[in-house]
Image (cartoon, grey):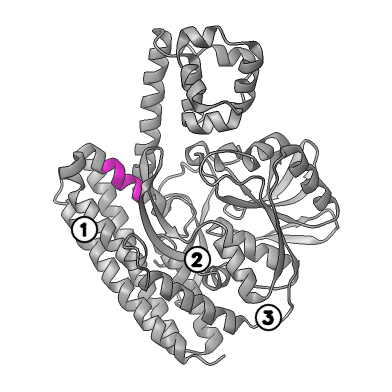
């Protein structure tokens, strides 16, 4: 645990988290006196999702997402817990930086959306053009800022020039210097009610979407595409696509297995909150599903590494993904029933 | 995933560690720092190697005089022509024209300065590619 002092002299506790957005949200709420864990924020904000956006390309490869759209966790969790918050975007980078400096001087810590490529404190291998990374600016220091990046173990220093580039970068999902902070946080919000809302929303998103590339249907859609990819694209291209899916699942701050373990942690916490054994069982089932996603990553890595010399084939990947889809569908159907029986 | 199953295979995070959710002995979820997983290393390595190969190919083409150094520096920053165009505030069709070495060599210094700022380079770095 790391303690930092903000400009107002208030201590700020930096917690290591798995996902940037839920980590930032829980830290901002905690700073205002509402002690809430990352997993709980993730569940209340309906962070878990699945989507295979085959038509949106990043570095020439389609995007597979395991989470809801950037910004949704903060917005939904804030709304459901009754938090009032301020969000601001800027046209002019100088104005955006000046406003940030002023807020920090007043002792307010601020959440920022940035481009991960320009944050030079990250290891080189993880820096790529992605405009959806969140961090908290704590205070101004000479030549830069002290920032708490929840994905890292400790708070770090960031050059002012780097931060400006990162906040005002271009490309898909431009942040436009987006900054946000809560202006009012209730001290005793109805966490149970918020959890129920979050879980219902998640079930709807995973089960009742009409678009076949999202939710449980999206997993099946992806499985079929992977199965056909060697014939369609050739073995080498198919490997590139498969590798990209695994990268999205494991590398981009997911807490393992594309957020499935984090959601299991949420279900466990919610189970204790409601004293519900059913939720705790669902948490165990979610862990088992997460383990299958990990197996998918292992098998894919083997295919890529050994170039078809093993018995692992794209058909096997298809089977694993179809099992994931079937079990997730059963889980969310069960959750949908359980959540309606819960008492606030 | 149990706590003892959290992968600690490799250390390509350059000393950094990332948080993983795992079950402890009592079956409760805790956050465990992990220093890397070999399966992840394979897919990350694939992407990194691909970028490096493309960059080297572009560097050779620049040295042969087929492309302007601007292409090399854009790829080094992992940008596409569209992202670069938006960052410097020049139409992407014009940016693509600047990929031609003859056009690039006649550019005004004010435009070159804008490119240098957008790509976080000095003026001299922008005009050449490294001789590895």
Secondary structure of the residue carrying tag 3 is: loop
Q: CA distance from mark 1 to mark 2?
A: 25 Å
Q: Is residue A225 left or right of residue A282?
A: left
Residue with the mark numbered 2: A47
The residues colored magenta run A239-245
Residue with the mark numbered 3: A189
Q: Residue at x 59, y 37 (%)?
A: A118
Q: Residues within 10 Å of mark 3 (few under 14, many from 20)?
A: some
Q: Residue at x 55, y 73 (%)?
A: A44
Q: CA distance from mark 1 to mark 3?
A: 44 Å
Mark nearer the N terminus (1 vs 2) = 2
Which chain hosts label 3?
A: A
Residue with the mark numbered 1: A318
Q: Residue at x 39, y 66 (%)?
A: B1
Which chain hosts label 1?
A: A
> What x and y, as percent, mark residue B40?
38, 48
> What x and y, as percent, mark residue A99?
79, 47
Question: Is residue A240 in the magenta section?
Answer: yes
Q: Residues within 10 Å of mark 1 (few under 14, many from 20)?
A: many
Which chain hosts label 2?
A: A
Q: Is residue A34 left or right of residue A129?
A: right
Q: Is residue A227 above or below residue B124?
A: below
Q: Is residue A31 left or right of residue B115?
A: right
The quadrant holding residue A71 is: bottom right
Q: Main secondary structure of the magenta part?
A: helix
Secondary structure of the residue carrying tag 1 is: helix
Please check whether the numbered discs 1 and 2 fall on a single chain.
yes
The quadrant holding residue A73 is: bottom right
């Amino acid at each position: 645990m790391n303690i930092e002092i903000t400009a107002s002299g208030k201590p700020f506790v930096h917690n290591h988290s798995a996902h940037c957005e839920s980590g930032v949200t829980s830290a901002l709420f905690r700073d205002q006196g509402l002690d809430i864990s990352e997993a709980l924020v993730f569940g209340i904000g309906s962070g878990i999702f699945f989507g295979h956006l085959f038509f949106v390309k990043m570095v020439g490869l389609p995007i597979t997402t395991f989470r809801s759209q950037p910004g949704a966790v903060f917005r939904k969790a804030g709304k459901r817990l009754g938090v009032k918050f301020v969000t601001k975007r800027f046209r002019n980078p100088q104005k955006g930086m000046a406003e940030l400096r002023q807020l920090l001087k007043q002792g307010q810590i601020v959440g920022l959306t940035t481009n991960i490529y320009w944050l030079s404190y990250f290891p080189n291998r993880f820096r790529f053009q992605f405009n959806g990374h969140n961090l908290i600016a704590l205070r101004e220091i000479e030549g830069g800022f002290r920032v708490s990046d929840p994905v890292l173990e400790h708070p770090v220093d960031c050059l002012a020039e780097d931060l400006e580039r990162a906040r005002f970068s271009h490309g898909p999902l431009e942040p436009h210097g987006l900054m946000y902070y809560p202006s009012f946080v209730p001290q005793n919000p109805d966490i149970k009610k918020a959890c129920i809302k979050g879980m219902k929303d998640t079930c709807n998103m995973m089960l009742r979407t009409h678009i076949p590339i999202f939710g449980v249907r999206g997993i099946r859609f992806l499985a079929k595409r992977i199965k056909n990819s060697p014939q369609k694209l050739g073995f080498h291209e198919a490997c590139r696509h498969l590798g990209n899916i695994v990268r999205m699942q494991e590398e981009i701050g997911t807490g393992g297995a594309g957020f499935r373990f984090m959601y299991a942690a949420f279900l466990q916490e919610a189970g204790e909150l409601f004293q519900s054994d059913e939720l705790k069982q669902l948490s165990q089932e979610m862990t088992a599903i997460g383990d299958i996603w990990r197996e998918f990553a292992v098998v894919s890595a083997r295919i890529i590494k050994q170039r078809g010399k093993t018995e692992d084939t794209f058909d096997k990947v298809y089977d694993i993904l179809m099992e994931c889809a079937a079990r997730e569908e059963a889980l969310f159907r069960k959750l949908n029933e359980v959540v309606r029986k819960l008492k606030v | 995933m149990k706590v003892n199953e959290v992968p600690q295979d490799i250390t390509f995070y350059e000393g950094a560690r990332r948080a993983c959710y795992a079950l402890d002995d009592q079956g409760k979820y805790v956050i465990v720092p992990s220093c890397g997983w070999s399966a992840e290393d394979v897919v990350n390595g694939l992407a990194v190697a691909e970028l490096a190969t493309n960059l080297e190919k572009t560097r050779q083409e620049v040295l042969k005089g087929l492309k302007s150094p601007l292409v090399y520096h854009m790829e080094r920053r992992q940008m596409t022509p569209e992202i670069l165009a938006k960052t410097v505030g020049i139409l992407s069709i014009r940016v693509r024209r600047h990929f031609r070495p003859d056009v690039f060599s006649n550019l005004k210094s004010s435009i070159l300065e804008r490119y240098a700022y957008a790509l976080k380079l000095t003026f001299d770095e922008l005009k050449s590619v490294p001789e590895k």
